[in-house]
Amino acid sequence: MATITELKGLSVQVDDVIYMPSLDAPDERPHPFVYFISIKNNSGQRVTIQGRKWVVKEGAEVMVVEGDGVVGQTPVLEPGENFSYNSYHVISGDAVAEGAFFGKTASGEWVFAKIPAFELSVPDWV
């Protein structure tokens, strides 16, 4: 397995988190949240985002979601470029989400950037 290092200058920002009850959600996880993420490449290297790993903690339950790419894409970020997208999680109660994006530099080095933890708090009016 290749060594994966945190790339200085590659960062992730959570731009917004919105409770969206109009989205489809299964009965056991009835609370959908849309989140808006920006991946910023302020390093000196081109990076292709290859995958992601999410860790969602709901009380004592921990759900890990891993996959290739980001929303079906493998964005290539030149130095100074950003990639923004939105997606959603469905939860049964208040939760905290965090994780990492994994990428490969033009020289073939595997790197990652942490996704900062953010809260998914079910509104009182629900």
Image: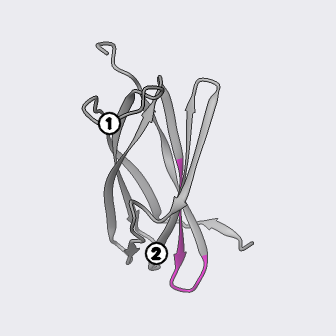
Of residue 101 and residue 82, the one placed in the foreground of this image is 101
Q: Position of residue 56 (x, y in %)?
A: 54, 38
Would residue 89 appear left or right of 81 to someone viewing this image? right
- Badge 1 crowding class, 10 Å Cα cut-off, few under 14, some 14 to 19, many 20 or more, is few
Q: Given the current orientation, which residue lies at the most extreme left position?
A: 22
Secondary structure mainly formed by the magenta segment? strand
Splitting the image into 4 quarters, where does residue 74 fall?
bottom left
Q: Position of residue 6 (x, y in %)?
A: 59, 63
Residue 35 position, x and y percent, is: 35, 43
Residue 76 is inside the magenta segment:
no
Which label's residue is closer to the chain start, 2 or 1?
A: 1
Instruction: Tell me the quadrant of the picture where the C terminus can be found.
Output: top left
- Which residue is outermost to the right? 1
Q: Is residue 61 left or right of residue 47?
A: right
- Residue bearing mark 2: 48
Q: Residue at 55%, 67% (x, y): give it.
A: 7
Report the magenta residues as a range.
99-109
- Say above or below: 19 vs 99: above
Residue visible at 56% across and 86% down in the picture: 107
Residue in front for this viewpoint, 6 or 59:
59
- Corner quadrant of residue 38: bottom left
Residue 108: percent from left, percent from top:
59, 83
Residue topped by disc 1: 24
